[in-house]
Amino acid sequence: MVPVPKPQWPGPWWKMTVPVPNSTAESWALPEPELERSPCLVGIIPIVYYSVLLGLGLPVNILTAVALSRLATRTKKSSYWYLLALTTSDILTQVFIIFVGFILQTAILARAVPSAFIHTVTVLEFTANHASTWVTVLLTVDRYVALCHPLRYRAVSYPRRTRRIIAAVFAAALATGIPFYWWLDMWRDADPPTALDTALKWLHCVTIYFLPCSIFLATNSIIIRKLKRRRRAGGGRTTALLLAVTTVFVVLWAPRTIVTMCHLYVASVRRDWRVHLALDIANMVAMLNTSLNFFLYCFVSQTFRRTVGEVLRGHPRPVPRRGRGHFPPPALKALKLLGSTAL
């Protein structure tokens, strides 16, 4: 992040005197200077990194949203609506966290904005972040039901119900984001952190990492075990994709979670330059997650690549009939689609 300036005295330290209260005679004492904060060692690297990430990731996510909206409208499949909701939440995350929270508020305005505005933006940042995480949880559960309970999946999965579930998740994300109105950046926490700071940091880690990872681990383990037992065609590729999805999420969000725990119980970001540096790097790694989905979809799904081509050309491409062998069986097609979801 941007280096925090050290406090500057208005004059030489020996001229700085303050009156001591409750004294029968006028007496003077030197003020106690604030302990030196940990320096920021990354310089302008985060500014360049987030600017490039926003400049490349935002157009790519908008392209992804347009392509997925076409597929959702054309096929009426619930899985495309979940992918569209995930892309929308990633766009909101890039706008509120990367652009407003970092580039505009921190780098350009240097936090010269009203306190109420800062706290309101913080609520929107966590709302977008929670929505992105928990829409991914919905995708994982949807994949589990589709592969392990296909008959039930056909009965409960339809667009109107899916849109209601997505709306409920976004509403819950807003509700869970409101407590973070009182959130302080880790380099602004008290040293040691107060009870409120500690509670909010734990709530953040549980909501963003610990609970979602537990769900991913449970559902993906069941899916992998059932795929091995049934020995389906394409099961090996799908299993590899499921492991890749879990690995991507764990790798990208683990550093921030670890640094948060270290900040609470090992060394404060305000005082230890190593924790400060680790936090800056962890934030950059976590935000990379908002721009990877497009490339994973393109790698896995031929249907998505074809639709992206239609969007870029500006006109739809005729879709071959099912009887000509251009499409895989429905079960395998659903398997590829749901297995390609990035976290």
Image (tube, rainbow, N blue to C red):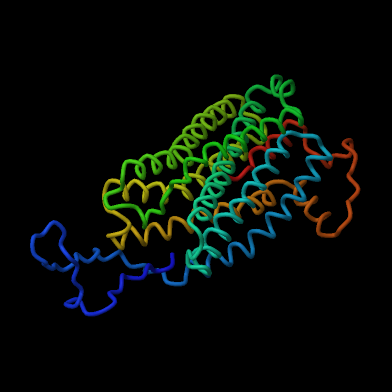
State the quadrant of the N terminus.
bottom left
- Residue 204 in the image: above or below residue 281: above
Residue at the left extreme of this rendering: 24
Asked if residue 149 lies left or right of residue 200, the reply is right
Q: Please count the marks in the image.
A: 0
Depth check: 120 or 301 in front? 120
Residue drawn at (42%, 60%) of the image = 280
Asked if residue 102 lies left or right of residue 65, the reply is left
Depth check: 320 or 124 in front? 124
Q: Horizontal and vertical percent for residue 319?
A: 88, 45
State the quadrant of the C terminus.
top right
Residue at the bottom extreme of this rendering: 12
Asked if residue 203 lies left or right of residue 27, the reply is right
Q: Horizontal and vertical percent for residue 268?
A: 29, 54
Depth check: 265 or 6 in front? 6
Residue drawn at (70%, 43%) of the image = 84
Depth check: 111 or 280 in front? 111
Q: Horizontal and vertical percent for residue 217?
A: 49, 33
Residue drawn at (57%, 38%) of the image = 173
- Residue 187 in the image: above or below residue 340: below
Q: Horizontal and vertical percent for residue 10?
A: 29, 77
